[in-house]
Amino acid sequence: MNTATENKQRKTENGNRLIPLGVITTVHGIRGEVKIRSFTADPEDITSYGPLTDKAGKRTFDVKVTSHTKDVLIASIKGITTREDAEKLRNIELCVPRSALPAADDDEYYYEDLVGVKVFTAEGNAYGTITALHNFGAGDLVIIRLESGADDIMPFTKATFPNINIKEGKATIELPTFIKQEE
């Protein structure tokens, strides 16, 4: 699952972490339909994991996908019947509790599960902590808060991160050659 949004820890009032599955981008037509950019592997799966909420977990949205275009889903939301009502929903992230998502396959990770993982060099030295992941279209990038307090950006590949243990909250980084030469 990929998301280009900032990977902040979102929690409901009862402490469940919320995972964004999409975002309402704009309205569609005059009857209250909206366009949704889905972050799920199969865009239409956005409604497969249970009720969708806002990122605070306070509002619930009953979403029905009515059609799709190349890049977005067209959907109706229960209770939203006018363009004006739909306009008020623009930029709302649609989330589900982390517990609603299936387990990730081997060597697959939900971005949210990687946030907070401690990063160590192959020699065992502390390197930093993963604070966010992004994909701007050319591949996944990891933002690491270094021990010095500065941020570093690395490609999220098997070569760069050969060992990740989510349960222990640790990852090993193999620094790319161009970085090793600068040190």
Image: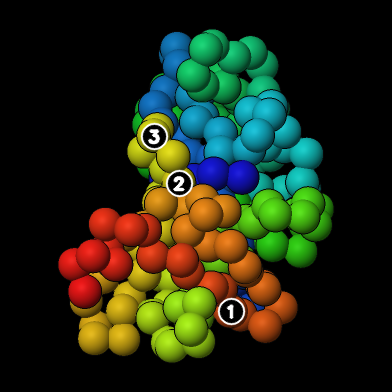
Judging from the image, what secondary structure is the residue with disc 3 in?
loop
Q: Position of residue 86 (x, y in %)?
A: 45, 30
* Neighbourhood count class around disc 3 (C-alpha, 10 Å): few under 14, some 14–19, many 20 upward: few
Q: Which mark is residue 125?
A: none
Quarter of the image where the C terminus is located: bottom left
Q: Position of residue 28 (x, y in %)?
A: 45, 16
Which callout, 2 or 1, points at the residue further toward the start of the chain?
2
Residue behind mark 3: 138
* Neighbourhood count class around disc 2 (C-alpha, 10 Å): few under 14, some 14–19, many 20 upward: some
Residue behind mark 1: 170
Q: Position of residue 100 (x, y in %)?
A: 77, 57
| Label 3 to label 2: alpha-carbon separation | 7 Å
Q: Quadrant of residue 48?
A: top right
Point 70% across, 54% down: residue: 107
- The colour scheme used to paint the residues is rainbow
Q: Nearer the viewer, residue 32 or 37?
A: 37
* Neighbourhood count class around disc 1 (C-alpha, 10 Å): few under 14, some 14–19, many 20 upward: some
Q: Amino acid at mark 1?
A: Lys
Q: Which mark is residue 140?
A: 2
Quarter of the image where the N terminus is located: top right
Point 56% across, 38% down: residue: 39
Tell how many labels: 3
Q: Amino acid at mark 2?
A: Asp
Judging from the image, what secondary structure is the residue with disc 2 in?
strand
Q: Amino acid at mark 3?
A: Ala
Query: Label 1 near label 3: C-beta < 8 Å?
Result: no
Q: Nearer the viewer, residue 33 or 49?
A: 49
Q: Is residue 128 above or below residue 174?
A: below
Q: Position of residue 152 (x, y in %)?
A: 28, 66
